[in-house]
Amino acid sequence: MRERLPLKTVLRIDFPPDHRLGRGKIQLMELIASSGSISAAGRAMDMSYRRAWLLVDALNHMFKEPVIESQRGGKQGGGAALTTFGQELLERYRGMEQRLKDALQADLDWLDASRNSDQ
């Protein structure tokens, strides 16, 4: 018998006309914060440096303030970090996720109890 995985909500915020903030960019931000590196964060998510850099660039253009600051290589080897705004964005997003989950928990429990047992 297969393990029955729990239901989960996914928060994605659309910024019309074509920007989105969701778990992929948020995970990238968390990995940059912990590793200090765009390339290391990208590798951890199994994506190219170019893809990671494009996501960072998109994040930095979505808001009035930058989300991530980077330094080019040199003696110190470069690196990247969340700005103060980026850290607040990350914390607020995670808070929104938790509030969404809390608000929907009774409905998720009902859905979970109502689904086929082979799922």
Image (cartoon, grey):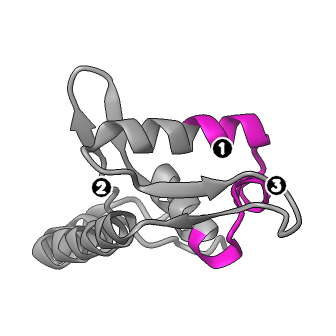
Choose between 77 and 15: the one closer to the eye. 77
**Which of the 4 image quadrants contains residue 108?**
bottom left
Choose between 23 and 41: the one closer to the eye. 41
Label 2, secondary structure: give it.
loop
Query: Which one is in front in this view, the residue at disc 2 or the one at disc 1?
Result: 1
The disc, 1 or 3, on the residue closer to the chain's N-terminal end is 1
Q: Disc 1 designates what residue?
A: 52
Task: Reply above or below: 99 against 12.
Answer: below
Q: Tell me the crowding category of disc 1: few under 14, some 14 to 19, or many 20 or more residues within 10 angstroms, Cα based.
A: many
Label 3, secondary structure: give it.
loop
In the image, residue 52 lies in the stretch drawn in magenta: yes
In the image, residue 50 lies in the stretch drawn in magenta: yes
Q: Disc 3 designates what residue?
A: 73
Q: Tell me the crowding category of disc 3: few under 14, some 14 to 19, or many 20 or more residues within 10 angstroms, Cα based.
A: few
Q: What separation in Å lies between label 2 and label 1 (alpha carbons)?
A: 20 Å
The disc, 2 or 1, on the residue closer to the chain's N-terminal end is 2
Residue 6, percent from left and from top: 43, 72
Q: Which residues are magenta?
A: 33-54
Mark number displayed over residue 92: none
**Which of the 4 image quadrants contains residue 9?**
bottom left
Q: Disc 2 designates what residue?
A: 11
What's under tag 1, amino acid-wise? Ala
What's under tag 3, amino acid-wise? Gly
